[in-house]
Image (tube, rainbow, N blue to C red):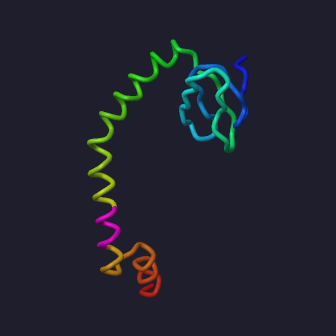
Amino acid sequence: MQRMYQPGEAAPVGTYWSTKTFEMVQIAQEGDCLPAGNGKFIRAPLALMLLVAPITGLAFVLFLPFAVPAIALHALGTRFLRRTGASKVEREARARVRR
């Protein structure tokens, strides 16, 4: 079982993973403290980091070209629908009135 470290606790040199924010924190010097905040930290083994880091980087590189246009289209579509007054709620309300 991995030891859980509390925020603000002094920790040995290594990489730590926040169970609340999924953030990776690097402790460079012996006795440095983990950042304050909520959640707990688990020390990530070096072998795991060497395996996971390239995979997450690859996923980010492959996903980003599709995510940016999708988010931009969603934002533009939402803005257009709000300006034209053709929101889903308004269309449903009009349909109820007609019945």
The quarter of the displayed image where residue 99 is located: bottom left
Q: Main secondary structure of the magenta part?
A: helix
Q: In this view, does 20 lie above or below 26?
A: below
- Residue 78 counted in the magenta span: yes
Q: Is residue 20 above or below residue 2?
A: below
The quarter of the displayed image where residue 27 is located: top right
Quadrant in the picture for the N terminus: top right
**Which residue appears farthest toward the bottom when viewing the image?**
97
Depth order, front residue of 35/41: 35
Residue for point 31% across, 41% down: 64
Depth order, front residue of 53/31: 31
| Apparent side of residue 67 relative to residue 25 in the rendered image (left or right) | left
Q: Position of residue 30 (x, y in %)?
A: 64, 20
Depth order, front residue of 75/4: 4
- Residue 20 counted in the magenta span: no
Q: Position of residue 83 (x, y in %)?
A: 32, 79
Question: Which segment did they paint magenta?
Answer: 75-80
